[in-house]
Image (spheres, rainbow, N blue to C red):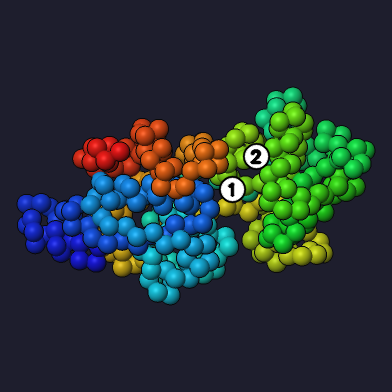
Amino acid sequence: MKKLLAIATIAFGLSAGGVMAQEECGDITMAEFNWASGELMANVDKFILEEGYGCNVELIIGGTAPIFASMNEKGKPDIAGEQWVNGVRVLVDAALAEGRLVAVNRGPITGLGEGWWIPPYTAAANPELITVLDWIERPDLFPSAEDPSKGAFVGCPAGWGCQNVNASLFDAFDMAEKGWVLIDPGSAAGLDGSIAKANERGENWLGYYWSPTSMIGKYDMQKLPWGVEFVGAEHWNTCIAQEDCIDPQQSAWIKSEVFTIVTDEFAASGGPIMDFLEARVFPGSVMGAMLVYMAEEQAAGEDAAIEFLIRYEDVWTAWVSEEVAAKVKAAL
């Protein structure tokens, strides 16, 4: 990619308009984040870039912080498709401001985020209850297995960053005084199991989760609006997100942001690949359905990418030119 535009111009002259010759795309390194949606996105990108643009893509597996640190400090990988920002907010803001990294797409997945959720049948049975403020007045709808006189709110397992947030918000909304108990599910499997058990039995459930995930997609879980405004980053970061927050204020959940970021060098030389990355947006419902497929079929990213490209042609063909789309379809 480093010499991409120069090669295209020399090979084809100004009559080609300086447009990249797809067979000259060259080598690209790309993050494959170590969770299902990140794995799917990376492999979809890889297939489209290799078959549609003639690139040679190397996937680098890793988590949010290591991938970001490598891009920020070493300039590799070239692309991180699903970089969750909140966990490295200060560092991301600095890197973008100083020009080391470029956010080519500030919303590659719609409908994502953390919050409090209920099953769809619970929402349908109680149409008068809309916001968190409404639901927490009805602990009787969510009886705890250990003490049915109390409502069960399922928080995060111990050790997760969201454990502090849920505990703080539980206090801020005076939920203990309203008749609730905060349940530690013990593990990721315990949290998932509590959702699955409730849905399969048609029981009510209220608790923390996030999207896009297979659990949200499989059970069509409904995220609750809060009924209050976000309190602000300072109070959130210095109190709500900390252990033993003394005086937490009522707040909506901090906005979850995901960017597709590239290095400054790639931004300068990426040509039409930058256009593709900017246009590439996965609808939340589509991503959710694909995560359900990956979980149920135990499909890895490479196989899931093929399934996505076949199943959702109407989605991805809007991201590319007709010529690129034809090449990708021919390769499936």
Residue at x-position 70% and y-position 67%: 238
Q: Residues within 10 Å of mark 1 (few under 14, many from 20)?
A: some
Q: Which mark is residue 128?
A: none
Q: Which mark is residue 113?
A: 1
Residue at x-position 72% and y-position 62%: 159
**Residue 84: x %, y % from top left:** 52, 57
Q: Is residue 141 left or right of residue 322?
A: right
**Disc 2 vs disc 1: Cβ atoms closer than 8 Å?**
yes
Q: Nearer the viewer, residue 104 or 75?
A: 75
Q: Nearer the viewer, residue 21 or 265?
A: 21
Q: Amino acid at mark 1?
A: Gly
Residue at x-position 37% and y-position 71%: 75
Q: Which mark is residue 223?
A: 2
Say whether residue 208 is visible: no
**Residue 61: x %, y % from top left:** 46, 61
Is 280 placed above or below 161 here? above
Task: Write down the quadrant of residue 248 in the picture.
Answer: bottom right
The secondary structure type at the circle numbered 1 is strand
The secondary structure type at the circle numbered 2 is strand
Say whether residue 119 is visible: yes
> Mark 2 or mark 1: which comes first in sequence?
1
Q: Amino acid at mark 2?
A: Lys
Task: Write down the quadrant of residue 29 in the picture.
Answer: bottom left
Q: CA distance from mark 2 to mark 1?
A: 9 Å
**Residue 164: x %, y % from top left:** 74, 59
